[in-house]
Amino acid sequence: MTLIDLITAQSARLKLAGVSFGHGTGNAFDEAAWLVLWALGLPLDALEARAQNVLTADEQAKAESLVRRRIETRQPAAYLTREAWLQNVPFYVDERVIVPRSFIAELLADGEQTGTLDAWLSDTTRAVLDLCTGSACLAVIAAMAYPEIVVDAADISDDALAVAQINVDKHKLASRITLMKSDLLSSVCGPYDLIVCNPPYVNTRSMQTLPAEYRAEPNLALAGGNDGMDFVRTIVRDAPKHLTAQGVLVLEIGNERRHFEQAFPRLEAAWLETSAGDEQVLLLTRDALLNGSAA
């Protein structure tokens, strides 16, 4: 059996089993390719060059075993491989954090090229906070995209901060990223020119219908209360005193735009374009936060 034949067969297994995707891949073939290549110790970009390589029986069995674990446990593939990629940057992950997938990463990585986020920053942007940092993926990508900045990365979870430390060390960014324990903004420093945050925002009804792969992730990092806005309300309330005069807050709220606008009807938000459209990530200036609170 060739490599491509094995991946095609495992893709069919995943599809038949009805597993859910969204933790690094969006379909059965890509998920199968990831698992098979990882099981065989091959780089993720090796498929095209090695598609017709004939595999040994042991290699085939090793790959099939990993796919079997994926189906039986319903764990995201990243938990099985202990690795996830975001904006072509590799991160260590395990069950202590959600799998990196924030659309804010696109805005950070492309900022200096497209200007989508860069247009809201300035030449004096230096201090950045990654709130609810989890694996520190946004902190790392921000530090890579903007070499002149320093980043504080905060989370309430000791487990998440332990994983974040692995990734900060992995990318040799300890001199520019400071990890800290904080219940939202309660213990952070600042003021910051930019705060990015992918908070828990899944509403109660949606939490009850999540596929098993998402339920395998820490509930603490997902559940946002009845309308998904419990933590967002606190962040919006407290952010102004942690921002510089020209500072901005970038929030990811997933599919909760309706709930966000119901919770903050007078808050002037700029909705930022990502690969998922313009309803997933929003930007709030300090002035907008202050004016919205006053209103």
Image (cartoon, rainbow, N blue to C red):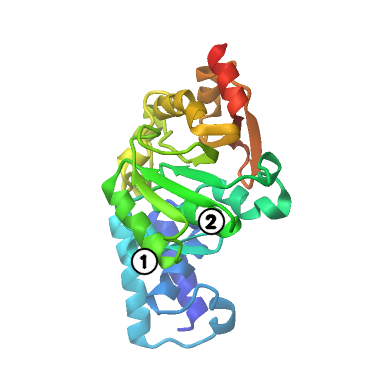
Q: Which mark is residue 17?
A: none
Along the viewing direction, whichever of 261 and 155 lies nearer the viewer: 155
Which percent across, then down, holds residue 269?
62, 27
In the picture, measured across the screen, residue 14 lies left or right of residue 193, that is: left
Q: Position of residue 116 (x, y in %)?
A: 69, 44
| Amino acid on which disc 2 is placed | Ala
The residue identified by callout 1 is 81
Q: Which quadrant of the structure image shows residue 61?
A: bottom left
Residue linked to disc 2: 143
Q: Is residue 143 above or below residue 287?
A: below
Can residue 103 be seen here? The reply is no
- The residue type indicated by label 1 comes to Thr
Mark 1 crowd level (few <14, some 14–19, many ≥20, 10 Å Cα)? some
Mark 1–mark 2 Cα distance, whole angstroms, equals 25 Å
Quadrant for the N terminus in the image: bottom left
Residue 169, x across and y down, in percent: 39, 64
Q: Quadrant of the C terminus?
A: top right
Secondary structure of the residue carrying numbered label 2: helix
Which SS class for mark 1?
helix
Could you tell me how many numbered marks the image carries?
A: 2
Do the CB atoms of the residues marked 1 and 2 lie less than 8 Å apart? no
